[in-house]
Every structure is written in C-alpha cells, then in structure tokens.
Amino acid sequence: MIPFKDDNPTYTFPFVTVGLIIVNIVVYLFELVAPDGGEQLAILYGAIPNNLVTFESGQPISPLGSVFTSMFLHGGLLHVGGNMLFLWIFGDNIEDMLGHFRFLLFYLFAGFIAAYGHALTDSQSLVPMIGASGAISGVLGAYILLFPRARVHTLLFFGFFWQVVRVPAVVVIGFWIILQVLSGLLNAGSLHQGGIAWFAHVGGFLAGLLTIRLWLPRQRRPSRF
C-alpha cells in the first residue's frame, strides 16, 4: 500500500511544507557528495539516544540541538524519498489548518517528541538517529484526527499486478501506525543495533494525534471531511 496523493483541497500555498522538502533534499545532496557518503555528518549531527537521556555529548552540538539537526539528515534515497512523499501528501493540509508558523513549530515539536520516544526505549544506544520520519509521523497523527475520511490515492500491489484505489485516510494511516507498533514490538530484542526507530514513529504520531487540537488557531476553517 503506497499512497501518492490525496483529494483534500487547501486554501493556502504550503510554503513551509515545500520549504522543508527543499531543505531536506538539499541536505541529502550534500550528504551524497561528502567523502564518506554522509556517515560523519550522521555521527556529528544525528540524535544519539544515550546522549538525549544523559545530556552528555562528544558531538559539536548539544543533545537537544542534535534532535533538530537529525531531522534533516537521511540514510539513503528511499529514506528521504519516502519521507518527503508523505510530507508532500499530508503536510499541506495540516499547514493550511494551523498556518505557516504554527505548522513549523508543530512539525519540530513532533520531531522532538519522536526522538525521545525512541531514546527512552533504547536509552543505552550510541547509534545516531537520523531522518524526518518522526516529525512527519506527527503530521500523520494530526491528519488522521482532522481528516479521517479524506480520500487518499493509493497503489495496491497484487503480485505482479497493481491498481490505484481511493482509500479513506483513517485506513491508510491506521494501517501504517499499526505496522509501526507491531514492528517496534517484534524488534524490541534487537536494540542498540541501529535500523528503523519504530518507536520514534509511534512517539511522533501520538504527539500529533493528542496535541493537534491545542495547536489549532481559535478562528479556524471547519474541517471539509
């Protein structure tokens, strides 16, 4: 199940969403031309779980600062491409509801909670965490609450065959978060070894789901779905 667009209209141009996508892509291109493929950047500016809980760091940036720099680093083309696709599909509607500045703060807040969602479940790990997926998970949590019935164009694969279907957001995002929770529980025994920070996704999602109404302006447009 691969979503690629939604039918949910917006009233404003998503300057922040587009800006975040551009910054992430530019940083990824910078990683590509780095001599070590960006490994050193991840070590220096990724969010290291042990540092986040001890507030001690040998990095050139504070542990809290690394949370924000880590949101713009990625480990490969599929990593950055998948994250930016989800941000493009779902970010514009949340930005439309919150306004540009509120959306940026909300995005960074969700990423911050996501980082600690992973750190608290793997507090001894020295493996840097990178990627925008925690912050984007917060966007998904907000979207499923505000627009559960919005139709999302999704690719479904049946062996060698595929079909485009329009699926309610609650199904697409609901399936996604169930997968994150199950994957996190199944991989709980392989901590400290790197890989996907499943509980960062869960933490970011819950941050968005539980707090999005607190971020909404008092005078907001009614939900269209």
Image (cartoon, rainbow, N blue to C red):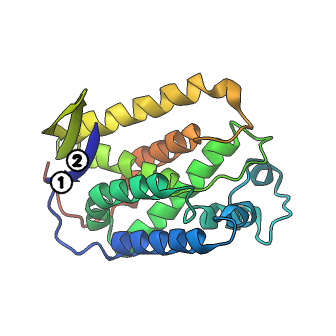
Seen at 61% across and 56% down, the residue is: 130
Q: Position of residue 206 (x, y in %)?
A: 47, 42
Q: Is residue 24 left or right of residue 48?
A: left
Q: Image quarter for residue 68? A: bottom right
Q: Position of residue 56 (x, y in %)?
A: 86, 58
Q: Is residue 136 or residue 26 the one in the foreground?
A: 26
Q: Is residue 162 left or right of residue 193?
A: left
Task: Find residue 223 and name its label.
Answer: 1
- The earlier-in-sequence mark between 2 and 1 is 2
Q: Is residue 84 or residue 49 the one in the foreground?
A: 84
Seen at 35% across and 69% down, the residue is: 17
Query: In the rendered view of the protein, which quadrant contains the N terminus?
Result: top left
Q: Is residue 123 or residue 45 the one in the foreground?
A: 45
Circle nearer the viewer, 2 or 1: 2
Local crowd size for mark 1, using a 10 Å CA cut-off: few (<14), some (14–19), many (≥20): few
Seen at 17% across and 57% down, the residue is: 222
Up the image or down, 136 lies above or below 23; here it is: above
Q: Is residue 93 left or right of residue 62?
A: left
User: Could you tell me if the residues under marks 2 and 1 are in contact, i.e. CB atoms within 8 Å?
Assistant: yes
Q: Position of residue 16 (x, y in %)?
A: 37, 73
Q: Is residue 186 left or right of residue 136?
A: right
Q: Position of residue 51 (x, y in %)?
A: 79, 54
Seen at 64% across and 43% down, the residue is: 118
Q: Is residue 17 or residue 116 the one in the foreground?
A: 17
Q: CA distance from mark 2 to mark 1?
A: 7 Å
Identify the residue position indicated by label 2 in the image: 147
Type of residue at label 2? Phe
Up the image or down, 91 lies above or below 122; here it is: below
Q: Which SS class for mark 1? A: loop
Up the image or down, 169 lies above or below 106; here it is: above
Type of residue at label 1? Ser
* Tally of numbered discs: 2
